[in-house]
């Protein structure tokens, strides 16, 4: 087999990332988990006769449009429902054409908006007509927490809290734990709305370890409330210190109210939740793509977390120690504690930190990308760096360490004119980091 050439590393990274994102696209995933045979809809652990009742579809998240389109393709012509619309789709702004049977609502993300609240109210109205014998099919993906919300606190307070949590470096499972205490649609609230109909949910996971109750804040997963844990996260993160004192006090007061987990309107309507796609699927595809290029490839972990800049140092260390023509794949989701005034995302910050650690190391590459193709508030999926990146920036008068200190990774790569990764949208299964080693012998610069 011809060995991959370092000069083509950009093409290699893009090829590997593209393969990982392609396998996590909703169309093939939904078709594996949802089938129609005549008047029967075949789902995991549940078979539903379309002639026995009405079907309601609720699709929410960054992948909501693609998941809804995939479900519509499986469903095909269907005249069994007497209600209009057949489904509600809630996602970020889009120009995609949805089947006419769906009503589309644009929510706010990553900060919930009044549109997110109106979307939740529309879902409540939509599901208020369910009866025994009906089926509610929910399609949930990452981003649902912000896109679908009906907070117990004023919207301005809710927005300020979400902003503070995102800037504080909290992990997503910590943020969603807090959200469940302040928004009744989370932690099983959507399932409660679905009852007395049966409710089946197909979940595209963007949370490390796939805890169902925390993906999208678990709208169809009845989840016990842990007030003390939520209060501890707020205390340790310093998020409340980023808020107006009155708003912070309102948040504390609402969390301290004893609120049970959401329960259904009847004793026990059928309720099923299934993880249908996650980072493991993407990591496996990344390894296969790397092997096709000529690398030996392995998944090192799918639980990469912590501060992005520390993860970048770790990924650089992995690249340094890798054998010739080896690709290590790391999946997970890091965080960024924002103290600067720059623009970026966790994947770009990880890559910039890796560039600093890799400086002087020949034929080493670290790349990191979001599988939803949106790294933070930017239009790029992430970035890739080599042992030459920092030197190339220095020749342009760009100080990589200063950009990192200002949390300004996006403008570092933009000014450099090299390194950004773009990818297809439509999926969302955490982030993917690659540590690539090409030929090593005699090529390491003196440190």
Image: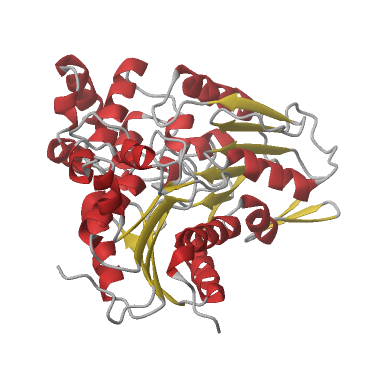
**Residue 388's spot in the image, x, y percent?**
30, 58
Q: Nearer the viewer, residue 215 or 418?
A: 418
Extreme-front residue of the structure:
395
Q: Residue at x 39, y 51 (%)?
A: 207
* Residue 105 in sight in this render: yes
Q: Is residue 426 above or below residue 35?
A: above
Q: Is residue 119 above or below residue 289?
A: above
Q: Answer with the quarter of the image where residue 134 lies.
A: top right
Side of 72 where 447 appears, left or right: left
The quarter in which the N terminus is drawn is: bottom right
Side of 111 where 22 appears, left or right: right
**Residue 93's spot in the image, x, y percent?**
56, 27
Side of 335 where 201 appears, left or right: right
Q: Residue at x 49, y 74 (%)?
A: 4
Please tell me how many numbered marks the rendered image carries: 0
**Residue 188's spot in the image, x, y percent?**
45, 41
Q: Nearer the viewer, residue 141 or 227?
A: 141
Q: Nearer the viewer, residue 286 or 106?
A: 286
Q: Residue at x 54, y 24 (%)?
A: 119
**Residue 264's spot in the image, x, y percent?**
50, 39
* Residue 306 in sight in this render: no
Q: Nearer the viewer, residue 280 or 236?
A: 280
């Amino acid at each position: 087999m011809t060995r991959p050439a370092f000069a083509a590393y950009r093409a290699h990274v893009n090829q590997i990332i593209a393969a990982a994102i392609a396998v996590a696209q909703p169309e093939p995933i939904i078709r594996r988990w949802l089938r129609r045979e005549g008047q029967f809809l075949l789902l995991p652990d549940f078979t539903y006769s379309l002639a026995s009742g009405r079907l309601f579809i609720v699709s929410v998240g960054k992948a909501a449009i693609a998941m809804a389109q995939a479900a519509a393709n499986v469903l095909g012509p269907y005249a069994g429902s007497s209600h209009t619309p057949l489904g509600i789709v809630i996602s970020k702004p889009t120009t995609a054409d949805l089947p006419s049977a769906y009503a589309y609502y644009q929510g706010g993300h990553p900060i919930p908006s009044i549109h997110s609240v109106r979307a939740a109210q529309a879902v409540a109205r939509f599901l208020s007509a369910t009866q025994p014998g009906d089926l509610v099919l929910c399609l949930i993906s990452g981003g649902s927490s912000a896109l679908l919300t009906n907070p117990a606190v004023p919207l301005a307070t809710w927005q300020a809290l979400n902003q503070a949590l995102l800037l504080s470096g909290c992990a997503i499972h910590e943020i969603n734990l807090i959200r469940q205490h302040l928004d009744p649609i989370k932690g099983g609230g959507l399932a409660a709305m679905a009852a007395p109909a049966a409710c089946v949910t197909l979940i595209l996971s963007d949370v490390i370890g796939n805890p169902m109750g925390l993906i999208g804040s678990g709208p169809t997963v009845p989840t016990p409330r842990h007030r003390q844990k939520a209060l501890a996260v707020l205390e340790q993160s310093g998020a409340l210190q980023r808020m107006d004192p009155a708003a912070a006090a309102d948040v504390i007061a609402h969390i301290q109210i004893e609120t049970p987990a959401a329960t259904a309107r009847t004793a026990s309507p059928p309720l099923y939740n299934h993880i249908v796609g996650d980072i493991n699927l993407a990591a496996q595809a990344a390894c296969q793509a790397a092997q096709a290029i000529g690398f030996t490839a392995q998944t090192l972990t799918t639980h990469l977390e912590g501060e992005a800049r520390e993860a970048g140092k770790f990924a650089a260390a992995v690249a340094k120690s890798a054998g010739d023509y080896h690709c290590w794949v790391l999946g997970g989701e890091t965080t960024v504690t924002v103290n600067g005034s720059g623009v970026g995302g966790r994947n770009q910050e990880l890559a910039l930190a890796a560039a600093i650690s890799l400086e002087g190391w020949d034929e080493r590459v670290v790349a990191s990308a979001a599988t939803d193709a949106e790294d933070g508030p930017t239009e790029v999926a992430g970035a890739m760096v080599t042992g030459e990146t920092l030197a190339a920036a220095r020749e342009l008068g760009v100080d990589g360490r200063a950009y990192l200190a200002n949390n300004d990774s996006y403008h570092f790569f933009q000014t450099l004119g090299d390194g950004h990764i773009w990818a297809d949208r439509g999926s969302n299964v955490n982030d993917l980091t690659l540590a690539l080693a090409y030929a090593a012998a005699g090529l390491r610069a003196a440190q």
